[in-house]
Image (cartoon, rainbow, N blue to C red):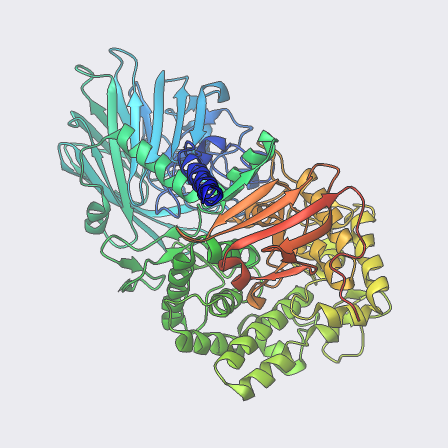
Amino acid sequence: MKKNYKYILLAIIISISACKNTIDKNNIPKVSPANNTNLFIGTGGHGHTYPGATVPFGMLQVSPDNGISSWDWCSGYHYSDSIMIGFSHLHLSGTGIGDLADIRLMPINKKVDLSKEIKSRDDLEYKSLYSHEDETASPGYYSVNLKSHNIKVELTSNLRTAFHKYTFAQNDLQSVVLDLGFAINWDKTIASKINMIDATTISGYRYSEGWAKNQKVFFVAKFSKPIEKIELVADGNYITDATSVVGEKSFAQLYFKSENTSQLLVKVAVSSVSEANALENLSKETIDFEGIKSEAAETWNKNLSKITVQTDNKELETIFYTALYHTQVAPVTFSDVNGEFRKENDEIVKAANYTAYSTLSLWDTFRAEQPLLTITHPEKVADIINSMLAYYETNKILPVWTLYGNETNTMTGYHSIPVIAEAYIKGIKGFDIKKAYQAMKTTMMQDERGLNYYKKYGYVPHNLLDESVTITLEYAYNDWCVAQIAKELGEQDDYTYFMNRSKAYEYLFDIETGFMRGKNDAGTSWKEPFDPKYSAHRVHAEYTEGNAWQHSWFVLHNVKNLIQMHGGDDKFSNKLEQLFTESSEITGENVSADITGLIGQYAHGNEPSHHIAYMFNFANKPWKTQYWVREILKTQYNTTPDGLSGNEDCGQMSAWYVFSSMGLYPFSPASGEYQIGSPLFKSSTIKISEEISFTIKADNVSDENIYIQSATLNRKDFNRTTISHKEIMQGGVLQFKMGKNPNKNWGIIKK
């Protein structure tokens, strides 16, 4: 009996110890990933990000404007600058095209002449110098000292309201300029209005055309002090004895009493529908700047904690959490608090039981950004699809690239289609799949954007439409995605039809050169002369923002067939290796500026290259995927303002990093599978739900130990280069053992 007591006692001790470990883990101080970000990453070079304040997928992005109209100022801000012209409320993250920067406020300490003709920012009397030494940015917060006016500006936001805090020097004039006229980049003001509602509130609108052809932004701004005086200007003329002004270009200078406090607080809301809706969107509580700032940081910490990584390298941690941050600034909330939003035809509709989103950079984001959302924010994926279907109801075609409710028709293909297919294949609910399927099918059966040629010839002939090769390859993948949903819904005839059309890439493969090439409408000859390094930006080009080296690999849905077309695994992988080792010379007189981040001819700075390093997996050379993925992670991202090798493109550049640093990549999103690369961290944990998590561990991982030696999934041998979405969502542990030499037996498909 005494022995039994000993065993019982030992069991109790072990049990208590286990409980203690659990309790200790729960009592570990909460990680604050927002503190491990650097929001200036991407604001230099060609990253085109902004450092201002927003919340995850927020309607507003209140951020500084430098006032320059140039490619590298697409977001309104570039780290190389030192002049500020104000703080507007709508911005784009790394699109490569400039628009928005609507409803700009600028605090100043002097009276200025707003009636002067403005040709450039040099003509703005209210501009100010600033220094990066006096500038701070963190998720949900931005601040800067305006040197010329001796004013500290602080910005924060919640979902539909932006908050400003201006701290003036003691006894200085306290004034704010509202500028609805001066536009930057592609944008142009066509109508505007400013109206003083009461002693502390102004409202109005700004209509503009640019990348978004019919953009209407209504606003309300409420100040913490009464407006002592207002001066209004319309189209170069001061309007006296008035509290309202309408014109093409409207401006206002507001004056406030400086006694009692040196601080002036402002809260601003916008709407695509009306001033009344903007007022309804405006946060109703008293302006509590510090409280809103704390709430924004807490929201970001909650969202950024959906994936946690462990590493001894703090720079890698900063790159990761900044990347994860950038994957959540777009798409943006577009419907108002009452559900209403404006379509480009000026129809006002209501989002019923969903939130409408805009800024859908689908050519970029279908590749990794949208797949990441299926893991971290599946409910938002359903809302994004419902937003696309609302667009379809009006246009009878799915969107290409929507900005503030407008179709820009930017880029090639219809990549709303893989977004829908991926969501359904992954089991995401909340949208009508039959309606979505009809939209997918109808879109791919219409005649716009080269589909008439594609249907007639089986490919797009180069002599009938520019960018013919890229368009053909992308339509082939779109067709394959339609076929997958047709199969799921039992539409066998449709499945057969679209699967046959998805072989369109076969028409364009030139076995002699090993590249996808432009073919004429007779199907008898390739476009000559041919140089695989040649680039022509959008005009007389066969490839979109790239060349044959970068675009000949876009066959996401049938890599095995592509390998056979090349002559087998070895010939294919040798050609693929040459992509990375070829000289980085790009030829042509009109080379696309988007070809950046070059490793050989691989161009990580633009999306068509993003899947390519993972193609070695299909050719039984997974160690080459591991090598080149690590090389890209190491060379194309860093913690400086120039830390992105190309346009951020609404989260895609960063989503590639998030996935690849964990050791995964959604190679063909609608397949529901992820390719295995080379994990960068000791561990990465994805929080699936409150009860379920999926952890990727990499034992012995280091800068040298980049090759997978062996792996287990939930303690069972794992010897394949793919893992399904379903396996990840069920939770568990995928554990790798890493080494510095390739294990050429791991992940090999036996034939």
Q: Residue furthest front?
A: 1
Measuring 45% from the left and 72% from the top, which residue is drawn there?
Answer: 397
Image quadrant of residue 366? bottom right
Q: Residue furthest left?
A: 198
Q: How far across and down, in percent of the image, does residue 310 sit? A: 56, 37
Q: How far across and down, in percent of the image, does residue 666 sit? A: 59, 58
Q: Quadrant of the N terminus?
A: top left
Q: How far across and down, in percent of the image, does residue 742 sit? A: 80, 48
Image quadrant of residue 608? bottom right
Q: Residue furthest bottom?
A: 493
Residue 32 in view in this figure:
yes
Measuring 29% from the left and 58% from the top, which residue is drawn there?
Answer: 341
Front one among 382 and 183: 382
Using the image, determine if residue 141 lies above or below residue 91.
above
Using the image, determine if residue 131 lies above or below residue 210.
above
Measuring 56% from the left and 35% from the top, which residue is drawn there?
Answer: 317
Position of residue 505 in the picture relative to residue 273 (left or right): right
Image quadrant of residue 494? bottom right
